[in-house]
Image (tube, helix red, strand yellow):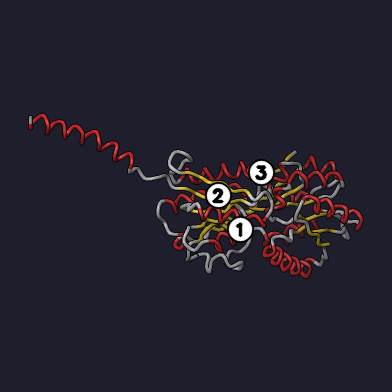
Amino acid sequence: MRRRELLSLLGGTAVAWPLTARAQKPAMPVIGYISGASSDFMREYVNAFHQGLGSAGYIEDINVLVQYRWAEGRNDRLAGLIAELVQRRVDVIAVGGSTPGALAAKAATHTIPIVFLVGTDPVEVGLVPSLAKPGGNLTGITILNVELLAKCLELMQILVPPETKIAVLLNPANTLQIKFERQTLQGAERTLAVHPMILNASNPHEIEVAFEAMVEAGVHALVVSGEYFFLTQRDLLVALAARHRIPAIYAYAEFTEAGGLMSYGTDNFDAHRRVGANTGRVLKGELPANLPVQQVTKVEMEINLKTASTLGITFPLAMLGRADKVIE
């Protein structure tokens, strides 16, 4: 009887072990992903983010969960959405292309790791004290954006006839970025001897009003800020530029792919992929404080000759030779 009881006890223990192991299986880590744009607009960028995560060994719903939050183009919603992620106690917050979003995340938590993507200088806007040693709970990716505004203005000067009135479209809702953009433009005015008309827009209606103002003022060329809101309004901007026959240069290649005349900027998809890769590194245990902020410095020029023909624009051969991609 004792032997039978012992075997029965051992058998029960053997059955209990896997049940206990299953009960104690650690929960999957959770990423809180916040964007100032919409889910539809961000689909391809989120795919790039997941490519980066995959390079670190993480696949959504297999060994990591992702909680998404979308501000739908309204920066005033960012703080509330990030507060939801903090309350959810996510393991890391990834901010996809938003300086206001990154700042709101920093204000919301000093303990949850944050990986950001911004088009401003992270040191100047107060996200980190140093690119090489970010310290604290933040690290991320920065792309050339504000710095390229003057170059875009110079390229437009080359493209259009002398004395052509040029406008620059900015987003006043991003108060920090517009501050640095205005400083950049002031320097460009001195070096390029140009005085562009400054227009502001932070919603679709204001974009339409800005184009009406350009037409009334006799503006025949436009430089669009690389502030992320304008990327979410890509189709509207391209359509209005075509309707009013205004040559425009943009900060992202996605505009020329959609029929815009010209773009000059960094690779947005590569930047989002890097955010995913760094998020994976944080999940593996690396501290944001020890991960230097990466700078995406490669700049690409893209030209749409079909749109140029429609507008009656002839690109100089030297500019065509510098282009990384020409759509014919």
Q: Nearer the viewer, residue 269 or 25?
A: 25
Q: In this view, does 303 lie above or below 129?
A: above
Q: How far apart are marks 2 and 3 (CA)?
A: 14 Å
Q: Residue 41 carries which label?
A: 3
Q: Name the residue under label 2.
A: 33
Q: In this view, does 15 lie to the left or right of 127?
A: left
- Nearer to us of marks 2 and 3 is 2
Direction from residue 183 to residue 130 in the image, left or right = left
In the image, what residue occupies the spot 47% across and 53% down?
Answer: 89
At numbered mark 1, what does the secondary structure look like: helix, strand or loop? helix
Q: Which residue is drawn at 76% across and 59% down?
A: 153
Q: What residue sits right under mark 1 in the picture?
A: 79
Mark 2 and mark 3 lie on one chain; the one further toward the N terminus is 2
* Image quadrant in which the C terminus is located: top right
- The residue at the far left in this view is 2
Residue at x 84% of width, y 47% of height: 313
Give residue 146's quadrant in the image. Answer: bottom right
